[in-house]
Amino acid sequence: MIALLLFSALLWDQAAAWGFKDGVLHNSIWLERAAGVYHRESRSGKYRLTYAEAKAVCEYEGGHLATYQQLEAARKIGFHVCAAGWMAKGRVGYPIVKAGANCGFGKTGIVDYGIRLNRSERWDAYCYNPNGKECGGVFTDSKHVFKSPGYPNEYENEQICYWHIRVRYGQRIQLQFLEFDVEEDTACLADFLEVYDSYDDINGFVGRFCGDELPDDIISTGNVMTLKFLSDASVTAGGFQIRYSTLDTASSRNSSAPGKNNFLSGKFGIM
Ligand SMILES: *[C@@H]1O[C@H](CO)[C@@H](O)[C@H](O)[C@H]1NC(C)=O
Ligand SMILES: *[C@@H]1O[C@H](CO)[C@@H](O)[C@H](O)[C@H]1NC(C)=O
Ligand SMILES: [Ca+2]
């Protein structure tokens, strides 16, 4: 325990970039989930969230910090994560299904660090959002079609999805919008799809899309791309299907087919 805390103290020292951009709280991808519970770490790494930040992340994504009971219910159906996170009421712990020497002190159950007096400590977060649908993920295939959660049905309120695409170094990613229908408002503040020409949702912002007009194709400058979909608490729409495919750098440099494609300026080989 003491060793673990010392180790965490080292990690705390590196606490960094996390927070608001354009008035919106930006956060990490979510990793595993069960029974409405999911584990979140900061995009900048493990153990970077204060209690207030952890709470804000879960609420921004339409849920709240999981209670001990919700985490235990998830654990009972196989939710196993080797990382301590904030729960409701300032509690910290993590769910262990399979005993192992490296994690959980060889026990199973919720490894419980108790209610923390110091809410400035930095851990991950366990959020609970019973309405969140399975969506997003990390993709490395050379082509794939993404769909909004629940497609072809309308997406639901309070969803958040991240799709990270990483293809072979030297390749570019071409997004082609097959279907697109997202609640429309002038600044796309309610529901939106954002595209980033990078492996996170901070750098390389390309655009924010809503409404029912098909966006033009988008081609990455490097071999990575991130898509983020968020829906707010009311009004849904038909959703979207987006195909990505890969282009070799040489052929994508060949500008014999200019026009429709939004070629992006920028560096090659982000990552
Ligand atoms: C609370 O935790 C933070 C982060 O580890 C630390 O910097 C701070 O000194 C702690 N405060 C107290 C009162 O222990
Ligand atoms: C570019 O495209 C043209 C026509 O499609 C082709 O003739 C040419 O060889 C290509 N150049 C490169 C560098 O791929
Ligand atoms: Ca909406």
Image: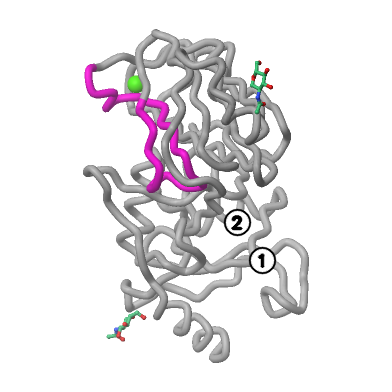
Q: Read off the residue under disc 2.
A: 72
Identity, as a three-letter code, of the amino acid under mark 2: Glu
- Is 202 covered by the magenta stretch? yes
State whether the magenta stretch is mostly helix, strand or loop: loop
Q: Is the residue 220 above or below the residue 175 in the image?
A: below
Residue nearest the viewer, comparing 83 with 170: 170
Q: Is residue 80 left or right of residue 84?
A: right
Residue segment shown in magenta: 186-208
Q: Would you call the spot at circle 2 few (<14 residues within 10 Å), some (14-19), or many (20 or more)?
A: many
Q: Quadrant of residue 19?
A: bottom left
Report helix, strand or loop for mark 1. strand
Mark 1 and mark 2: Cα distance apart in space: 7 Å
Residue 213's x, y, as percent?
Answer: 39, 8
Q: Quadrant of the C terminus?
A: bottom right
Q: Is the residue 61 above or below the residue 7 in the image?
A: above
Q: Is residue 127 left or right of residue 166?
A: left
Report helix, strand or loop for mark 2. helix
Q: Would you call the spot at circle 1 few (<14 residues within 10 Å), some (14-19), or many (20 or more)?
A: some
Residue 11's x, y, as percent?
Answer: 47, 78
Residue nearest the viewer, comparing 221 with 27: 221
The tag on residue 6 is none
Residue 42's x, y, as percent?
Answer: 45, 58
Q: How is the image coloured?
A: one colour
Q: Are marks 1 and 2 in contact (CB under 8 Å)?
A: yes
**Mark 1 or mark 2: which comes first in sequence?**
2
Q: Read off the residue under disc 1.
A: 109
Task: Identify the residue at horizontal 51%, vertical 47% (top origin).
Answer: 199
